[in-house]
Amino acid sequence: MQHPGRSDESGISHEETPLKSDPFAQLKLLDLQHVDSSLDQMTHQARTLPQHAALTDLIRRRDDVSDRCGQLQTQVGDLSRAQRKADADVEQVRVRRTRNRDRIDGGQVSDPKQLQAMQHEIRTLDNRISDLEDEELEVMEQLEDAQARLAALEAELAEIDSGVGEQTTSRDVAAARIAERRAEAMAERELLVVDVPPDLLKLYERLRNQLGGVGVGALHHGRCGGCQLDIGAADLARMATAPSDEVLRCEECDRILVRTHESGI
């Protein structure tokens, strides 16, 4: 059992002289604790809305897909330039072949050796065109594949953006509801603190900060409403004879104890 004037293992000091306060004000302290606990819960709810996690996941996915889109856009650009070059190469060789054929067909080449050389060049150009067309086809297939993958990623990106918008709206609506309830609770709190004396309020706030947000509990059937531990018989006997305006303290957790008609003393 803790004794007045000593500190427990957590460093919380018990008061040397018991604080005095009107029983009505002490009961108001229980109402204030209820409101403050609700406010703490709302703060936790606002921080841990499921939309926060969903948005984090969507943004992570968006960054990954966006990076892949950028890489594919670069690849599509490179392949598009490669295709244009392949088209130009094929066209250049075709023009040369057509020019040679037109000269032969038009009887412009009379020298047998020159004619033979030109016919040989045409066959060489035909082979070259075939090779270039194969290369051109390969580039086209690669480009079509890259474009298809890019289109799929862009569709996925659009879907993610839609999800981000939906989750953002849902988060904002949920946060607004919490903010509205919080405003109502804060207004109720302002009314309650008017009925609590400054010295009692100061003690309550200090204990709340030190003891996980709970600075007061009702003495309910011989048990502390703060730490939920039973009060010893000797302490209960002392509490039973204490003046009604004396602010009781739990000897286990140091929280303020408020007597009610269900205190059991």
Image (cartoon, grey):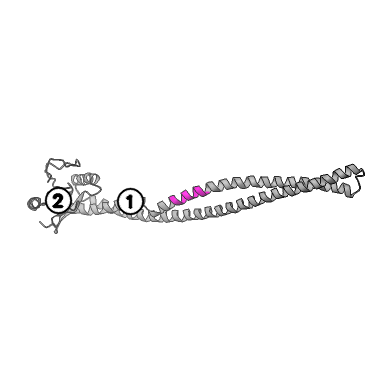
* Residue 6 among those drawn in magenta: no
Q: Given contact means CB atoms under 8 Å apart, are the residues at marks 1 and 2 in contact?
A: no
Label 2 sits on what residue type?
Answer: Asp
Which residue position holds label 2?
Answer: 22
Give coordinates of residue 109: x percent, y percent.
Answer: 90, 44
Give coordinates of residue 131: x percent, y percent.
Answer: 73, 48
Looking at the image, which is closer to me, 238 or 205? 238
Label 1 sits on what residue type?
Answer: His
From where the camera sits, is residue 186 visible? no
Looking at the image, which is closer to me, 143 or 165? 143
Say which of marks 1 and 2 sits in front.
Answer: 1
Crowd rating for badge 2 (residues with CA inside 10 Å; few <14, some 14–19, many 20+): some
From where the camera sits, is residue 119 visible? yes
Name the residue at 85% across, 46% down: 119
The outermost residue toward the bottom is 262
Q: What quarter of the picture does the C terminus occupy?
A: bottom left
Give coordinates of residue 174: x percent, y percent.
Answer: 39, 56
Q: Secondary structure at mark 1?
A: helix
Location of residue 17 by image quarter: top left
Which residue position holds label 1?
Answer: 44
Name the residue at 21% across, 48% down: 215
Range of residues picked out in magenta = 56-65
Looking at the image, which is closer to me, 28 or 160? 160
Q: Is residue 101 left or right of residue 28?
A: right
Mark 1 / mark 2, whichever is N-terminal = 2
